[in-house]
Amino acid sequence: MGSRRLKRRTGFLFQVAWLRVDTQTILTIANHVITKNHRIGVTHSEHKTWLLHIRDVRESDRGNYMCQINTDPMKSQIGYLEVVVPPDILDYPTSTDMVVREGSNVSLRCEATGSPTPNITWRREDGELINLGNNQEVPSIDGPVFNITKVNRLQMGAYLCIASNGVPPTVSKRIMLVVHFTPMIWIQNQLVGAQEGQQMTLECHSEAFPKSINYWTRENNVIIANGEKYEPSFSDNVYKVHMKLMIRSVAMSDYGSYKCISKNSLGETDGSIKLYHIPTPTTEPTTTSTLPVPTTVDPVENIQWSRQKPMPSLEPSSNEITDASLSTVVRSEETRIRGRPSHEENHEAENVIDTNSHKNVDNDIGQRRIDNTAQSMSSKSSTWHCVTRSSAAICIIMLSALS
């Protein structure tokens, strides 16, 4: 009787065991490991606290574990071991890089494992918004499947399938979506003018994928090569190409049509630019000289002075007007002067008689009056008036007599 009590006090009869509940597998009894799993271990602290150790925990270790004491009745306690697993993207069901024709439907798929079950998010690698068509753009798409209806070139690029479940690290896979389409060209200015000797640059914009071969030609379809006269250049960004052709010094032989051509395995297209000639502006000197006086004139018939006083004759000068020139000038400007007299010309305008009332005046009388007037002109009052007609300046001396 005494020895049994001692055994109970020292714990030899009441032993602790660890069991796997779902499989009813005994793992340890007291200090002994029963299972053949080398990752399992047991320790205690003065036989009061018993610890079950599992090294290199695996997802298969998830489940219920029981700590049992072999009393009568038995005492036990169950604990659940949750094993979290960082996400991992599966290669086989997940899409790889894809090459499709523009306008076709595309389905990108991404599968991942982990505990808890990972969430799948799609983003563009370059950080740009995802184009969904119909002018819709979003930063990301959630779900294991990303469907694109009638894919276009704007949706081409690298996409990231990102899997996360709160357990680090988050993982991702890069899927490249390549969209093939035939070349397209647009030109901002199809008609360009230039002067001789001017430096001129022609420009075309092209889009194509696979990448296109790009070049310039003239009307004879000969490819324009880089040289002393021409300098073609091309700058590309993914599927876009900016084509330039610099003409260092435009000559008359350079005027005409130019073609920018873009060609890939799916097709070919071209655009045309016409270079036309702009005349070089010339600067004409401004002159103040009058028109040459005509040598053949008709006698003046339509002028009569109502008051005439003896006037000293004028000295010859560079501005001298002969009888013949005065006859022509006065007769051609007669109507305008009579219609618009200035303040200083009112007196002379009154002395101009309508031509209709003097149609019967003899030519000799008209000529004699002009001769007498020219010999008796006074230098006290003379006025210069210049009018412009047919791009020529005509100067008229209006004479007024002092009463």
Image (tube, rainbow, N blue to C red):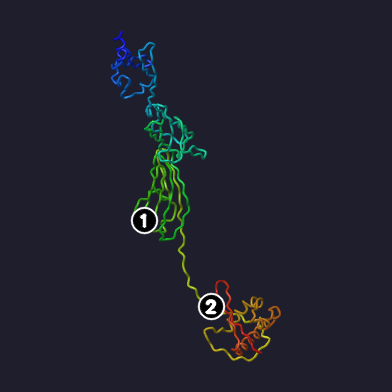
Q: Tally the numbered discs.
A: 2
Pointers 2 and 1 in contact (C-beta within 8 Å): no
Q: Residue at x 55, y 75 (%)?
A: 393
| In this rendering, position of residue 285 left or right of residue 351 | left
The x, y position of residue 309, in whole percent, is 65, 90
Taking the view exactly as shown, the residue that stands out farthest to the front is 2
The amino acid type found where label 2 is placed reads: Thr
Taking the view exactly as shown, the residue that stands out farthest to the top is 1
Which label belongs to residue 290? Answer: 2
Question: Element at badge 1?
Answer: loop
The x, y position of residue 107, in whole percent, is 45, 31
Disc 1: CA contacts within 10 A as few (<14), some (14-19) or many (>=20): some
The x, y position of residue 109, in whole percent, is 43, 30
Report the front residue among 168 and 278: 168
Image quadrant in which the C terminus is located: bottom right
Q: Which residue is mark 1?
A: 229
